[in-house]
Amino acid sequence: MPELPEIETVCRQLRDVILGAEITRTRVLDPKLRGSGGLTGRKVEGITRQGKAVALVLEGGGVIIVHLRMTGRFLWHEGKGIPPHTRLVISFSRGRLLLIDPRRFATVTVSKNLPTAPLGSDLLNDGDPSQLWLLAQKSKAAIKAFLMDQRRIAGIGNIYACEILHRAEINPWRKSNTLSRDAWITIAAVAKEILKQAITCRGTSVSDWRDLFGTAGENQRYLMVYGREGEACYRCGERVERRKLSGRGTYYCPACQNEKGGPNHGTMEL
């Protein structure tokens, strides 16, 4: 599933291609996306990231909000025909913006305004460690689940939660309300480093992710634990393990991220 770096990547690329451009036609190819038409003649005056969603702000009011979900992606297409699994086509004078989604989980909403439902802190731009620490004091959730809760922290999914906690030397199962303020300072700092690097690499392509031009990201080259079950930890040499936490495969180092493994460790509860 595309996370903050992947969505930020495609937003930046979209600004270079369609910002200020007029929609000349929309074609809805999947009945599940009915209600996404009627946009002809509208100009795109803004492109923003809302957590894991892309928001295309239209001139004169209105916004197209796209959640790519598991396998959705945008593709800028200037040739003839359309690739398989295309669900929506938004045409401009220079080319077409395609929504491709093999599993059909992506959603498209056309509304008058940006969503009013609150999103959590954005660790790329405004993650205040003190505020996060105060918020975490009210939660007994495992820290990895806390990081992935979009109401608390927006844009973080499984890949980057694993990577952030490994770099911060924090056990994924540790209860959020047991972390110190200093631990949250560490989390915020390493999260920003990891997210910025991933954006520079145009995201992490371990499965379906491709950028706006169909090119795989490169951040998978720099993953420390995610997808590395059984391989040696780059920090200590212990074998990386994978276990389920809240139904998600969780990669971690049992040496670096246990009660003896670092300054921000915690005991794992299974």
Image (cartoon, rainbow, N blue to C red):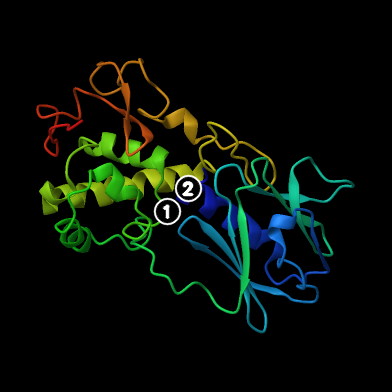
The three-letter amino acid code for the residue at tag 2 is Glu
Relative height, residue 97 to residue 2 (above, below): below
In percent of width and height, residue 230 lies at 35, 15
Q: Which mark is residue 84?
A: none
In percent of width and height, residue 227 lies at 42, 26
Relative height, residue 104 to residue 170 (above, below): below
**Crowd class of label 1 (few under 14; some 14 to 19; many from 20; radius 10 Å):** many
| Residue drawn at point x = 35 percent, y = 46 percent | 193
The three-letter amino acid code for the residue at tag 1 is Gly
The quadrant in which residue 37 appears is bottom right
| Residue drawn at point x = 65 percent, y = 46 percent | 104
Residue reaching furthest front?
A: 31
Relative height, residue 168 to residue 36 (above, below): above
Q: Is residue 101 left or right of residue 131?
A: right
| Residue drawn at point x = 66 percent, y = 38 percent | 215
Q: Which mark is residue 3?
A: 2
Q: Which mark is residue 155?
A: 1
The secondary structure type at the circle numbered 2 is: loop
Whether the residues at callouts 1 and 2 have beta carbons within 8 Å, the answer is: yes
